[in-house]
Amino acid sequence: MNNEPLYVLIQPETRNSYWADNIRTGIREAAREWRDAICAIDPARAETLPDLNERRVLVVGNDAAWLEPALSRLMNRGAQPIIVNACMLPVRQFRCSGVVFELEEMLDQCLARLNASGRRRTVLLGVNPGSVTDHVKADAFGRPEDIIWSPGRLDDCVSDFIDRLDETGFDSVICANDTVAVCLVQQLLALGCKLPERLHIIGMGNSYVGAQLKIPLTSVMFDYRQMGEAAVRLYHSLCASPLPCHMTVSLPCRLIVRESAPVGSKPAASPIPPVIPQPQRSYFDSDMVQNIIRAEAMLQAGDTIDREILFGIARGETCDAIAERLFFSSRAVRYRIANLVKQYGFENRPALEDAIRRAIGSNEERNPS
């Protein structure tokens, strides 16, 4: 075991965010291999710790309003932060090491594939002004006139976009995250819009909800567990370096092509635990959006059987039909549903069924994935 603990500072508001949970899991697994003792820093008490001088600290966060002051406080105490976030561009003034995703390259790939598919005008939709990562997406997109920011509720942003769709001439959309994309698909289908003919839609996050829509979502997959593991490896590389230096590790991300944007022939992979956008006041403040996030939380936290039961509910299957398909007893299926109702605070079973059906939409015409 190393003599020095591995210090980790995580943005407090990300406790219920699956992307941060996956980073934490990656850090824990890699630390176990390196025999590191992890020391979690309490953000409220970081300034009072006496032993941060020349210590490297893993910093996990995506909100600029939190991340920049946190880096400043640590560096003022002599610490050497290692940023663990999807990007570093807005905080490069701190000259820190870090682990990032190749967002710019992925956006270029999405635009090239849309163009090759005959799409001539693409919008970047639902960009969150409070997200460091979304600012990088906007910079990489490069066409300010075709970027739609969402300073308020994201479903209002989506509704406004749909209202002006005919006059804008957009024929393809890259959404800032999968929640934006799910809202867009659901609202367009409710209006009778023919997808993907009218609009090609690409999300970011490769969520379970997006993959199970009536028009399954093409989306960018990020491996946040790998990011946590890479952060620990970078930490040890920096510790072993004989000279002071800064290093950045860039991790690839992958486009999973499904029906919402048929822009390639690669087979769709099962989603890995995706990035769930951090809940923030106003941006995610609506019943529709909260229902999507809640449904994704159930799908993420459950095992394979729970997910198949929930997918079956979304398709309108009865408990007996689900049990027959899974080679379970009807009693076992009902027991699992009752546990989900209790665990996620639903009033009763019909409330859970309504939530998952509203999140994913009617899927009766599709075969199980």
Image: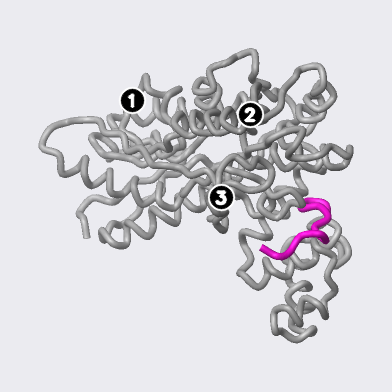
Label 1 element class? helix
Residue sitting at x 73%, y 75%? 336
Label 3 element class? loop
Q: Which residue is mark 1?
A: 76
| Alpha carbon separation for disc pair 3 and 1 | 34 Å
Residues 288 and 178: in front is: 178
Q: Which quadrant does the N terminus fall into?
A: bottom left
Q: Which residue is mark 2?
A: 118
Query: Could you tell me if residue 13 is visible in this image?
Result: no
N-terminal-most mark, 2 or 1: 1
Establish if 49 lies above or below 326. Answer: above
Amino acid type indicated by mark 3: Pro
Q: Is residue 127 left or right of residue 342?
A: left
Instruction: Where is residue 11? Give x, y as percent.
Output: 51, 40
| Alpha carbon separation for disc pair 2 and 1 | 52 Å
Q: Which residue is mark 3?
A: 274
Instruction: Where is residue 252? Give x, y as percent.
Output: 41, 42
**Badge 2, how many Cα within 10 Å: few under 14, some, many 20+?**
few
Residue sitting at x 68%, y 70%? 306
Q: Residue furthest left?
A: 242
Q: Quadrant of residue 77?
A: top left
Instruction: Where is residue 265? Give x, y as percent.
Output: 55, 48
Q: Which residues are magenta?
A: 358-369
**Disc 2 or disc 3, which is closer to the eye?**
2
Instruction: Where is residue 21? Give x, y as percent.
Output: 51, 52
Tell me whether circle 3 and circle 1 mark residues in contact (CB < 8 Å). Answer: no
Amino acid type indicated by mark 2: Gly
Q: Is residue 237 left or right of residue 301?
A: left
Tell me whether circle 2 and circle 3 mark residues in contact (CB < 8 Å). Answer: no
Residues 112 and 44: in front is: 112
Query: Could you tell me if residue 306 is visible in this image?
Result: yes
Q: How many marks?
A: 3
